[in-house]
């Protein structure tokens, strides 16, 4: 697939505020600072589409980007950022649960994982929640360019093995780098609209 156009449509606090057409949606979610905005910009080849911040926890709303005038890329709030209040964490959790339980046109959910890290409990808990709620998801490993060559093949494979041990699922995955554009074609092939 070729991306011919991409534009920001709106930010929403709940699904009631989200765009009300029935375009398919491809949701990006992950821990704070995992590189969601950078990945969106790399995927669309538009460096200014999603706002990038060095400070974790920048995305606090449901952000809809219209791609090729026929599907949405959705940037969801990052979870697991320690330096916010319990009230803010609960607010983010409510936004995420609301989106996944009330939005009917989600095609695929992409869970972004920093490939450099060992499996984090919060990611495993979230994937388990998706599994229990029958939500189709795939993993995108980010920041591949930050690994040494010898680590690149093993990290993702070991991560998936851990997920299988804990959750008895083996999600399909893509290894990516916003810097080198690795994984871009594979991701577009999965979306395939």
Image (cartoon, rainbow, N blue to C red):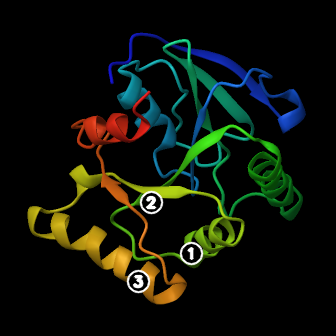
C-alpha distance separating marks 3 and 2: 13 Å
Give how far across and how far down residue 50 sits, in percent: 53, 26
Which quadrant is the N terminus positioned in? top left
The residue lying at 26 percent from left, 35 percent from top is: 185
Q: Which residue is mark 3?
A: 162
Q: Is residue 44 above or below residue 145?
A: above
Query: Taking 148 as reference, is 63 left or right?
Result: right
Q: Are marks 1 and 3 in contact (CB under 8 Å)?
A: no
Give how far across and how far down residue 180 sits, in percent: 21, 37
Quadrant of the rendered image containing residue 156: bottom left
Q: Is residue 57 above or below residue 119?
A: above
Q: How many marks?
A: 3
Query: Taking 177 as reference, is 55 left or right?
Result: right
Residue situated in front as seen by the camera: 4 or 113: 4
Looking at the rendered image, the disc whose residue lies closer to the viewer, 3 or 2, is 3
Q: Tag 3: Cα neighbours inside 10 Å, few (<14), some, or many (≥20)?
A: some
Q: Which residue is mark 1?
A: 124
Please tell me whether mark 1 sits on a helix, a strand or a loop. Answer: helix
Q: Is residue 44 above or below residue 151?
A: above
Please tell me whether mark 2 sits on a helix, a strand or a loop. Answer: strand
Which quadrant is the C terminus positioned in? top left
Give how far across and how far down residue 186 sits, in percent: 28, 42
Q: Which residue is mark 2?
A: 113
Q: Earlier in the sequence, mark 1 or mark 3?
A: 1
C-alpha distance separating marks 1 and 2: 11 Å
The residue lying at 80 percent from left, 30 percent from top is: 12
The residue lying at 43 percent from left, 36 percent from top is: 191
Give how far across and how far down residue 24 sits, in percent: 61, 31
Outermost residue, left side: 150
């Amino acid at each position: 697939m070729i991306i011919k156009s991409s534009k920001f449509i709106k930010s929403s606090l709940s699904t009631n505020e989200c765009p009300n057409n029935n375009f398919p949606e491809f949701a990006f979610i992950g821990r704070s600072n995992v590189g969601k905005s950078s990945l969106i910009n790399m995927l669309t080849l538009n460096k200014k589409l999603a706002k990038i911040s060095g400070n974790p926890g920048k995305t606090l709303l449901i952000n809809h980007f219209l791609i090729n005038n026929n599907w949405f890329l959705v940037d969801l709030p990052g979870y697991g950022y320690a330096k916010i209040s319990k009230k803010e964490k609960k607010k983010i959790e409510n936004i995420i649960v609301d989106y996944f339980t009330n939005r009917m046109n989600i095609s695929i959910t992409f869970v972004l994982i920093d490939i450099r890290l060992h499996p984090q409990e919060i990611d495993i808990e979230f994937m388990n929640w998706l599994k229990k709620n029958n939500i189709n998801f795939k993993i995108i490993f980010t920041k591949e360019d930050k690994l040494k060559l010898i680590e690149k093949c093993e990290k993702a494979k070991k991560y998936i093995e851990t997920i299988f041990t804990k959750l008895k699922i083996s999600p399909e995955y893509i290894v990516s780098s916003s810097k080198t554009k690795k994984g871009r074609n594979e991701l577009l092939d999965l979306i395939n609209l």
